[in-house]
Amino acid sequence: MKIDIITVVPDLLSGPFSHSIMKRAQDKGLLKVNVINLREYTTYARAQVDDYPFGGGAGMVMMIEPLVNAVESLKNKCDYDEIIFLTPDGETFNQKMANLLSLKNNLLLICGHYKGVDQRFRDHFITKEISIGDYVLSGGELAAAVLTDSIGRLIPGVLNDETSALTDSFQDNLLAPPVYSRPETFRDWKVPDVLMSGNHKLIEEWRNNEALKRTAERRPDLLD
């Protein structure tokens, strides 16, 4: 899979893909992440990519021309399955969406910045708009990192144990059950006996019940 990310501040994305699972995914050749500096595609002086909004109001708006220049240049080299704009008013990102996007080959992510993006660009070039939650960030870069990590870890071969992703929270509209590791007893706090029983059927039943219990307590909306 290839994920291209257009941003005004590429340095914000220098860290998330250089470590841990995302780094291993790229080292294995299973994922390629390209961070593209939007300022390289502007024709305005001083690498300007934003301007005042028509009609007045606070904040600056990302201009349409640099964005179109960047997207059209990239589309000449790659056929994107989705061109995604990260924005607070987009569809809320969830595990189901991550699963679907992980099946794609080429994604282009557009990081919003300033007050917003010229609506004409959204109308004519964006195929999907995504929000990672009901709050506002300084820009879409962190959201792009979240999307890339969530999608990338689902690519077959990225995780050492591929069944791990299948038991993540939200995969079955359930939160994950509690997990335990060594030592078996710490400060008189014991691991549940069933997990030490070696009876895989009982362990699986316990995990399913605990997942249902945790979901009912913390996210009952998922059970609807």
Image (spheres, rainbow, N blue to C red):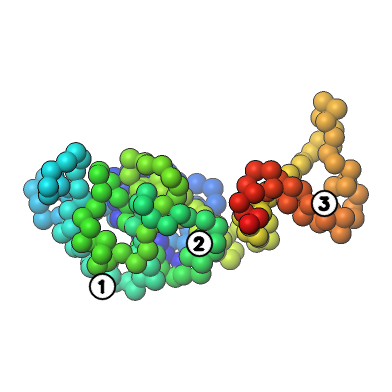
* Circle count: 3
| CA distance separating discs 2 and 1 | 27 Å
Q: Residues within 10 Å of mark 1 (few under 14, many from 20)?
A: few
Relative to the observer, which residue lies in front, 217 or 6? 217
User: Regarding mark 3 in the picture, which secondary structure is present there?
Assistant: helix
Q: Nearer the viewer, residue 202 or 71?
A: 202
Amino acid type at image mark 3? Trp
Distance of mark 3 from mark 2, alpha carbons? Answer: 28 Å
Disc 2 crowd, CA 10 A, few/some/many (<14, 14-19, 20+): some
Cα–Cα span, label 3 and label 1: 53 Å
Residue plotted at (74% across, 44% down): 179
Image quadrant where one finds the C terminus: bottom right
Mark 2 vs mark 1, foreground winner is 2
Residue 189: image x %, image y %? 83, 31
Q: Which residue is mark 3?
A: 206
Mark before the other along the chain sequence, 3 or 2: 2
Residue behind mark 1: 76
What is the x, y in percent for residue 163?
68, 61
Q: Amino acid at mark 2?
A: Met
Residue 34 appears in the picture as rendered = no
Secondary structure type for disc 1: loop
Q: Is residue 167 left or right of residue 112?
A: right
Residue at 30 percent across and 50 percent down: it is: 112
Horizontally, is 155 left or right of 175 in the view?
Answer: left
**Secondary structure state at the residue bearing disc 2:** helix
Q: Is residue 104 above or below residue 117?
A: below
Mark 2 touches mark 1? (CB < 8 Å) = no
Q: Amino acid at mark 1?
A: Asn
Q: What residue appears at the point 85 percent right and 47 percent down from the top-left corner?
A: 195
Disc 2 marks which residue? 97
Residue farthest along the left direction in this orientation: 45
The 10 Å Cα crowd at callout 3, few under 14, some 14 to 19, many 20 or more, is some
